[in-house]
Image (spheres, coloured by chain):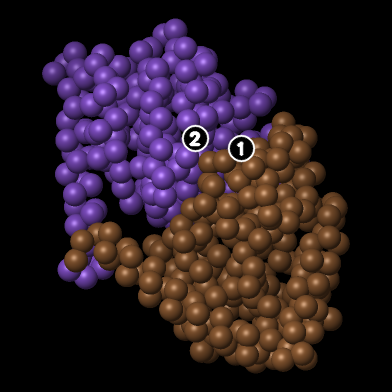
Chain colours: A brown, B purple
Amino acid sequence: MDRIAVKTNILKDNQQAAAENRRLFEQEGTVVINLMSAPGAGKTTLLEATLRNMRDRERVAVIEGDLQTDLDAERIRALGVRSRQITTGNVCHLDARMIARAIAVFPIQGLDLLIIENVGNLICPASYGLGEDFRVVIASATEGAEKPKKYPVMFNKADVVLLNKADLAAPSGVDLAELERNVREVNPKAVTIALSCRTGEGLNLWIDWLQEAIASRKTASVGA
Amino acid sequence: MDRIAVKTNILKDNQQAAAENRRLFEQEGTVVINLMSAPGAGKTTLLEATLRNMRDRERVAVIEGDLQTDLDAERIRALGVRSRQITTGNVCHLDARMIARAIAVFPIQGLDLLIIENVGNLICPASYGLGEDFRVVIASATEGAEKPKKYPVMFNKADVVLLNKADLAAPSGVDLAELERNVREVNPKAVTIALSCRTGEGLNLWIDWLQEAIASRKTASVGA
């Protein structure tokens, strides 16, 4: 079997596993987010801010992906929220089978919201669906305005793009409006929200978006 | 052939191609740097500052790696420095064969210094040697202090770790000394230099390091 055939098989296997995950998530009425970004764009800090706001209102849990360490899962547990760490070793992305193995021992029964924080990487995770409802990509203002053009696959598949560290745009010499234009050029349909976890700016818009996603799922379940 | 065998073969092929690149580089007396970091850590901005300083003193050229766009190669050419863009499409790293194909049409004869800017990714490029003399990894202060622990393979193989955007450490709430301690924990041998391309802080230390690498190579060539 040659390299391309092996890669095609890996992606096909992943699609099947993702479809099975999706079936389980839908059965529970759980909204599932696949949260992706470059290293250090602020995924875990955003999660902390999000969970502080939502933890008393919704049944929520988190799966964390990293090469090494369970630092992130511990940060989430410190907030009193259930969390499971997947360490991938050398693997540069989460895949659907890793998620299937995780939820086999980390029950999702009755969850309103499951957020999966992917490995910090703007390339490889884009190719591996996990069975999620929404792909949320964080672009940090400190990374510069041109990242959507350089990593088009990741941004093209995003449902939501969060323009994080908005408060550091000016000190970094980055034009947030240009970053947003570059997101739209690659993906005109994505919802974009500028925010900062340090100042709190824009966080309410993100929380509103999440609450609406949960509310829509609950309405759909009642209707079904 | 199973997946692991395919991966093993890919890495073995790469090692052979890297050895052949290295032979060519040594023959020319060219010092070759493999510059790696997460997206947006400041690789190209560092290159611009470096080249402005060195372009009149040393014969230097740049190979740029990105998934898409030749924005970076154009930034380098705007400084009057020779530059070649490799666009990898979906491939998340440069490999030695890509470099071999590039230098077949982008002559390295007589170069003192060739800097290869890898694809923005803190994981995959670590596994693919290019035939370089030195691996230089940029950790941006804005990414947080814990990145060396989370991406140990990349930091463990680095010869030099540049702690970039040092001026944004305080506004980002990041302790630069903690970042440096975490680098040392993963890799006690790496040279670490804190710098900022915006303020110019620490740039002289980085330029000195480069000049010394070039001088050592020239001395070795004369001795040979």
The subunit letter for the residue under badge 1 reads A
Quadrant for the N terminus of chain B in the image: bottom left
Label 1 CA crowd tier, 10 Å (few <14, some 14–19, many 20+):
some
Residue beneath the point at 77% across and 35% down: A170
Q: Secondary structure at mark 2?
A: loop
Exactly how many numbered labels are in the figure? 2
Quadrant for residue A158, please give it.
Answer: bottom right
Marks 1 and 2: which is nearer the front?
A: 2
- Residue bearing the label numbered 2: B69
Q: Residue at x 25, y 59 (%)?
A: A3
In the rendered image, residue B161, in percent from the top left (x then y), is placed at 48, 40
| Position of A56 relative to B7 (above/below) | below
Q: Write the residue at 24% across / 53% down.
A: B11
Tell me which corner region of the image, top left, top right, bottom left or bottom right, holds residue B186. bottom left
Q: Which mark is residue A81?
A: none
Residue A142 lies, in percent from the top left, at 67, 41
Amino acid on which disc 2 is placed = Thr
Q: Is residue A154 visible?
A: yes
Q: Is residue B111 left or right of residue B207?
A: left
Find residue B133 and report its horizontal and vertical position in percent: 30, 33
Residue at the left extreme, as displayed = B224
Q: Does the CB distance between marks 1 and 2 fall below 8 Å?
A: yes
> Label 1, label 2: how many angstroms apart (C-alpha)?
10 Å
**Under tag 1, what secondary structure?**
loop
Q: Quadrant of the C terminus of chain B?
A: top left
Residue, disc 1:
A146
Residue extending furthest toward the front? A223
Residue A140 at least partly seen: no
Q: Mark 1 vs mark 2: same chain?
A: no
